[in-house]
Image (spheres, grey):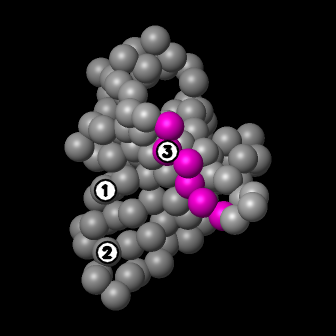
Amino acid sequence: MKNIIQLWEDNLLPIKDAIYFSNGRSFLCKIMDYPTLHIERNGEFDFSAFYEKNKDEVTDIDKFREIKLANNCYCCVGEGSYGSEGFVAYLDENKNLVWVLYSEES
């Protein structure tokens, strides 16, 4: 059974609008831009159960930019193989995934 860290290391992400934490927690979410930009969180879900039933529902990702932050951690951004989707990830000081927000529409 793969977890989100293993998928990240394989340059893959699930095709599901959500924020995925390295501790195994996952929340459905949607990036909304009207009337103001915000992230709508729609509840927690079981990533392991989702992935077990949807192993083909992943996209290859391209990491475009990695920015070192003032706290010595990193912000990483990029897109998926379909071009319309994107992600923002927060990495620790050793560049290990802490969380990643994936959106089917970037």
Q: Earlier in the sequence, mark 3 or mark 1?
A: 3
Q: Amino acid at mark 3?
A: Arg
Q: Position of residue 41 (x, y in %)?
A: 49, 44
CA separation, marks 2 and 1? 10 Å
Q: Nearer the viewer, mark 2 or mark 3?
A: 3
Q: Which residues are magenta?
A: 37-42
Q: Is residue 17 left or right of residue 22?
A: right
Q: Is residue 25 left or right of residue 40?
A: left
Write down the residue under mark 1: 98
Q: Residue furthest top?
A: 53
Up-down: is 27 above or below 79? Answer: above
At x 43% / y 22%, what residue is drawn?
51
Q: Quadrant of residue 23?
A: top left
Circle 3: element type: strand
Circle 1: element type: strand
Q: Residues within 10 Å of mark 2 (few under 14, many from 20)?
A: some
Q: Amino acid at mark 1?
A: Val
Q: Position of residue 100 (x, y in %)?
A: 44, 52
Write down the residue under mark 2: 73
Q: Earlier in the sequence, mark 2 or mark 3?
A: 3
Q: Position of residue 37 (x, y in %)?
A: 66, 64
Q: Nearer the viewer, mark 3 or mark 1?
A: 3
Write down the residue under mark 3: 41
